[in-house]
Image (cartoon, rainbow, N blue to C red):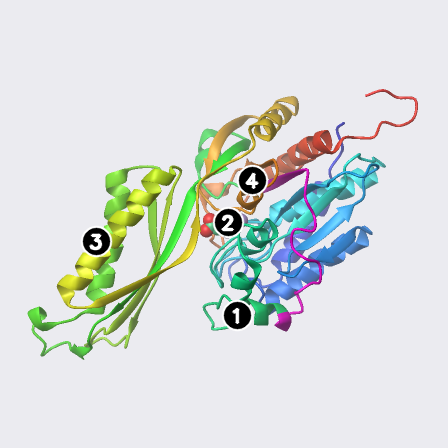
């Protein structure tokens, strides 16, 4: 069953949501559970309610909207996130949510009934930019992360998840795990350069690479930058810089697909002519193979310890996030590929380099993802852009696969 989607309506909604937390020059900032996130939640859940969907929010703030099916069956869930990093674009996460909404509204417009309920959801704190770990809401909902532990997590501004949920009124009453999907589908922008470079319209996502986030804290001794001989320093900043260089060396030595990123680093007292007595940095390591990721982690920790010891500094570390690589459901991946063929869309299989809510569903139900191209391959950047025809292709394919899974009720007198 093929349905018409309304691209203008989809674009208008993406633009309207993008105006919340808009940044000068483009893009937006809606950190998880911030005032901007609250405004985004109100807008999107308002659209859910306009369609008279059954809307509920669970205790970690995930918002679910369901259009009932004709049979007492578990729902087909489409979703993603509407929080952003501080330098976010208009499409990361948003496409999966508003694309899912567009599928449901188009199904309603077409007067189609499905056997399974159709649901769309947005999940709390996918980005991990304010509170670590990322994929928090979907992880809690699927039992991969502990609710109480996550509520106690403290963000970069010193506020806990529990307090932030209360503050913006996003803590719902539904228990987590109340809704067990028959399948989970997430449409997302690629956030990398592969599809655009090849001129391919659709990425059929086979899985997500493993993610390891570690925070290192180094304590040394502050001293005068001019008078303290190099051999007598306990320079926490130099150790941090050494760890950053080691992360790069690991990525170089291991080769692709190993990646390593130092996204945060701060020194104290942070003065031009004072040797830092404290340094804190984060390292993000990712690989598609769990054994290789573990080897990268082990090498990084060994090097960090050696660097700290050589400088007479003390080192502590804590894990901020750790997710093993995930393979998506092969049957659902095949269905996405078949759907792309039926729609005449060029496609290729590919792993995801970014983390996604879909990976939290993969252990509990068939889950898979659809990618559409990102202009210049950039994301987590205010210039993130995907052309309207690519957005529409993704939503059409999402509808095609979702309807096949949800089962279209044939009108009286017709056969399938
Ligand atoms: C989440 O967006 C991540 O991949 O870091
Ligand atoms: Mn995303
Ligand atoms: Mn993101």
Q: Earlier in the sequence, mark 4 or mark 2?
A: 4
Can you tell which of label 1 and label 2 is closer to the viewer?
Answer: 1
Q: Which mark is residue 303?
A: 3
Tell me where the magenta segment starts and ends, as one range: 166-187
C-beta proximity under 8 Å, tags 4 and 2: no
Pointers 3 and 4 in contact (C-beta within 8 Å) = no
Foreground residue, 88 or 148?
148
* Label 2 near ligand 3 (CB < 8 Å): no
Q: What secondary structure characterizes most of the magenta part? A: loop
Q: Residue at x 20, y 64 (%)?
A: 238
Residue 377 visible to an observer of this rendering: yes
- Crowding around mark 3 (Cα neighbors within 10 Å: few <14, some 14 to 19, many 20+) is some
Residue 179 magenta: yes
Q: Label 1: which residue?
A: 160
What residue is drawn where x is 66% and y is 65%? 170
Q: Disc 1 vs disc 3: Cβ atoms closer than 8 Å?
A: no
Q: CA distance from mark 1 to mark 2?
A: 30 Å
- Which residue bears the numbered disc 4? 362
Q: Which mark is residue 384?
A: 2
> How far apart are the alpha carbons under marks 3 and 4?
34 Å
């Amino acid at each position: 069953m093929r349905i018409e989607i309304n691209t203008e309506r989809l674009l208008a909604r993406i633009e309207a949501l993008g105006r919340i937390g808009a940044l000068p020059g483009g893009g937006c900032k809606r950190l998880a559970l911030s005032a901007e996130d609250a405004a985004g939640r109100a807008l999107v859940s308002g659209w859910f309610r306009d369609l008279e969907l059954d809307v509920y929010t669970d205790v970690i703030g995930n918002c679910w909207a369901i259009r009932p099916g004709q049979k007492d069956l578990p729902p087909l869930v489409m979703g993603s996130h509407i929080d952003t990093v501080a330098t976010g674009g208009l499409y990361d996460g948003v496409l999966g949510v508003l694309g899912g909404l567009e599928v449901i509204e188009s199904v309603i417009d077409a007067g189609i009934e499905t056997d399974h309920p159709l649901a769309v959801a947005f999940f709390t704190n996918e980005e991990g930019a304010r509170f670590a770990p990322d994929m928090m809401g979907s992880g809690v909902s699927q039992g991969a992360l502990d609710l109480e532990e996550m509520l106690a997590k403290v963000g970069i501004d010193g506020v806990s998840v529990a307090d932030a949920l209360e503050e913006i009124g996003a803590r719902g009453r539904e228990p987590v795990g109340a809704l067990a999907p028959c399948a989970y589908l997430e449409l997302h922008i690629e956030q990398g350069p592969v599809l655009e470079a090849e001129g391919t319209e659709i990425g059929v996502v086979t899985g997500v690479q493993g993610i390891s986030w570690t925070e290192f804290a180094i304590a040394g001794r502050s001293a005068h930058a001019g008078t303290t001989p190099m051999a007598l320093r306990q320079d926490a900043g130099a150790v941090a810089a050494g760890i950053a260089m080691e992360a790069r060396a690991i990525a170089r030595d291991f080769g692709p697909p190993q990646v390593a990123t130092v996204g945060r680093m701060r020194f104290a007292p942070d003065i031009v002519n004072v040797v830092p007595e404290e340094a804190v940095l984060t390292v993000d390591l990712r690989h598609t193979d769990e054994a290789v990721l573990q080897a990268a982690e082990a090498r990084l920790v060994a090097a960090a310890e050696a660097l700290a010891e050589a400088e007479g500094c003390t080192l502590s570390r804590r894990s901020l996030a750790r997710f093993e690589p995930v393979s998506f459901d092969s049957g659902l991946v095949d269905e996405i590929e078949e759907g792309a063929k039926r729609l005449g869309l060029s496609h290729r299989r590919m792993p995801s380099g970014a983390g996604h809510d879909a990976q939290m569903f993969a252990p509990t139900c068939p889950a898979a993802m659809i990618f559409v191209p990102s202009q210049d391959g950039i994301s987590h950047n205010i210039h993130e852009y995907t052309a309207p025809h690519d957005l529409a292709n993704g939503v059409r394919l999402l509808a095609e696969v979702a309807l096949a899974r949800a089962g279209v009720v044939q009108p009286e007198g017709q056969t399938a």
